[in-house]
Amino acid sequence: MAEPRNLDPSSSPRAMLGAELRHLRERRELSQAELGQRLFVSGSFIGQLEAGTRRMLPDIARMLDEALETDGFFKRNCKAAAKSKYPEHFAEVAEAEALATVIRQYTPQLIPGLLQIPAYVRAVNRAHDPTIPAETVEEWVEDRMARGRLLDHPTRPVLWAVLDEAALRRQVGGRAVMAETLHHIAGLMRRGRVIVQVLPFRAGAHSAMGGALKLMEFEDAPPLVYFEGARTGRLEDDPATVTRLKFVFDLLVASALSQEKSLALIGELAQDYAHEEHP
């Protein structure tokens, strides 16, 4: 077998690594499911590695080298593909987010990261750890704004967010910051760039009371769901789990206000914050 070339870290190493994996798997006439069985992972996980929506960790790289007899190729090159400016628990989801065609998200306490403004990001990170150096906070702000630039594209990804009313009424950073944040969201809604619905307090009990969730769909890879906690997170590709969480999101949408009523409430709260009235 010809020796696979080493990757150039400057030219989309994860995509190149995924393409090489697909080439070697097909050369051995293995399906994604068959290769997954050898690694004790799902076929969809192999598909996500090939599409570049999942990062290749050293243990997986080692098993791929053994299963495909690559003389250590994946182990040598997975470090280049794994480099990220994001925290370890969030790196995979941030990178998958950039490749997604559709993102469905529910947030119970925070404005979603893709919709945040710099001042909101600063306030959130200061609350997490008041001792963080100012320069570190600014680096995190820039990273978050870089993620938000995904929405600069006119149509992709489709972002469908259900925001709990609590996220709109919690004064992160103060009234002026909240006013600017809500005006920003309303602007994106009016331009038709995002779909946002508010889950009002009066909806009572709902399908996602266990916490936040994010569902992502891709052109050439199976969907993913992301569960997030305090400085922790987990990606899941199990089809049954993804299907169940999609149903949870559908129920949230059914309980939430319409887009028109949601925009009216967001605009009203933004005005209240701006005029220093109690919402």
Image (cartoon, grey):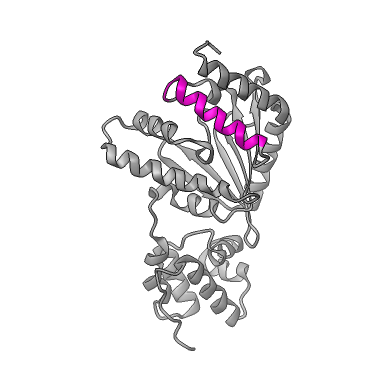
Is 138 situated above or below 182? below
- Looking at the picture, tell me which residue is in the foreground, 210 or 196: 196
Above or below — where is 4 with respect to 145? Answer: below
Residue located farthest toward the bottom when viewing the structure as drawn: 1
- Give the residue drawn at x 62%, y 23%: 267
Measuring from the top left, give residue 104's x and y in whole percent: 63, 42
Question: Residue 222 placed where, x, y %?
Answer: 63, 57
Q: Which residues are magenta?
A: 173-190
For the residue pair 261 and 78, the one nearer the viewer reads as 261
Q: Is residue 137 rendered to the left or right of residue 168?
A: left
Q: Residue at x 39, y 77 (%)?
A: 72
Question: Is 3 positioned to the left or the right of 162 in the image?
Answer: left
Query: Residue 224 at what x, y percent from top left?
Result: 59, 51
Q: Is residue 1 above or below residue 30?
A: below
x, y percent for residue 161: 62, 37
Task: Look at the image and tell me whether residue 258 can be seen.
Answer: no
> Main SS of the magenta segment?
helix
Count numbered badges in the picture: 0
The quarter of the image holding the C terminus is top right
Queried whether the magenta region covers residue 248, the answer comes back as no
Identify the residue at image location x=32%, y=32%: 129
Residue at image point 53% right, 37% down: 115
Whether residue 168 is visible to the viewer of this picture, yes or no, is: yes
Query: For residue 70, what is the image quadrant?
Result: bottom left
Residue 174 within the segment the image draws in magenta: yes
